[in-house]
Amino acid sequence: MINLSLLSVFIPTFFMVSLTPGMCMTLSMVLGMTVGVRRALWMMIGELLGVGLVAAAAGGGVATLMLRQPALFSIFKWLGGLYLAWLGWQMWRSRGRMAIPDEPRAARDVSRGQLFVQGFVTAVANPKGWAFFIALLPPFLDARLPLAPQLTWLVGMILSIELCCLLLYAVGGRTASHLLSRGGNVRLLNRIAGTLMVGVGAWLALG
């Protein structure tokens, strides 16, 4: 089903790659700050679906064709990036659904669907993610074994590793939120989160 010697290298390699700060990890940290870890899980579901799609396409060779369609990526990148930047600007001004409210009990009505779409678009619209999987995933596929079972196992492991790292970043963001909000620095926290969100949007659109 899968080459165990390759697997022993695959797991630490992808764990270190996933743990490295990037667009999705920064987004997870921001949402941990603003909407909480539990609510941020909806973004993570969308992100994992997007990562799984990209990884499966890379393993099957489809990603090579996708990268030859730059117009498709430009549409995803700019729409997704502008949307995230707009959310970040709203958060920086302590406005909008995702901003941290001044009152601890104030309701946040950001929808699950919005969070899901944020994660999915951020994962799928990143050309570097496609190129990364094209370069890194195929070496861990053993040509002597059937492709489909290997790809299923490896993609499943990638998603498990990615989820663990997303949760670590979200918990870190939530911890920072608690520490800052205790001092009454809700506006400062909104500006930090908003700046990071604008940065993710710019990264996605211009990367």
Image: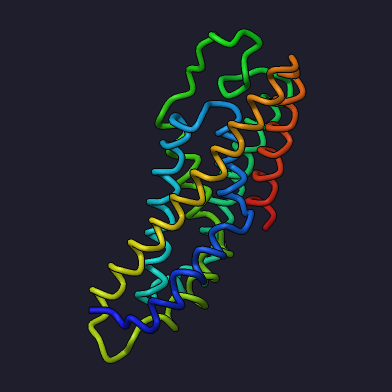
Up/down of 175 relative to 103, above or below: below
Looking at the picture, tell me which residue is in the foreground, 40 or 135: 40
Q: Position of residue 173 (x, y in %)?
A: 61, 36
Q: Quadrant of the C terminus?
A: bottom right
Instruction: Write down the quadrant of residue 184 in the picture.
Output: top right
Residue shown at 69%/19% (left/top)? Answer: 181
Residue shown at 71%/29% (left/top)? Answer: 89
Residue 51 in the figure: left or right of residue 156: right
Residue 95 in the figure: left or right of residue 2: right
Residue shown at 44%/69% (left/top)? Answer: 11
Q: Position of residue 146 (x, y in %)?
A: 23, 83
Q: Quadrant of the N terminus?
A: bottom left
Which residue appears farthest toward the bottom when viewing the image?
A: 144
Q: Position of residue 203 (x, y in %)?
A: 68, 51
Looking at the picture, tell me which residue is in the foreground, 175 or 47: 175
Looking at the picture, tell me which residue is in the foreground, 132 or 31: 31
Up/down of 66 relative to 168, above or below: below
Residue 174 in the figure: left or right of residue 91: left
Counting the numbered discs, the total is 0
Q: How is the image coloured?
A: rainbow
Instruction: Write down the quadrant of residue 141 in the picture.
Output: bottom left
Up/down of 40 relative to 133, above or below: above
Residue 27 in the figure: left or right of residue 157: right
Instruction: Write down the quadrant of residue 30 in the picture.
Output: top right
Residue shown at 73%/21% (left/top)? Answer: 93
Q: Position of residue 131 (x, y in %)?
A: 54, 71
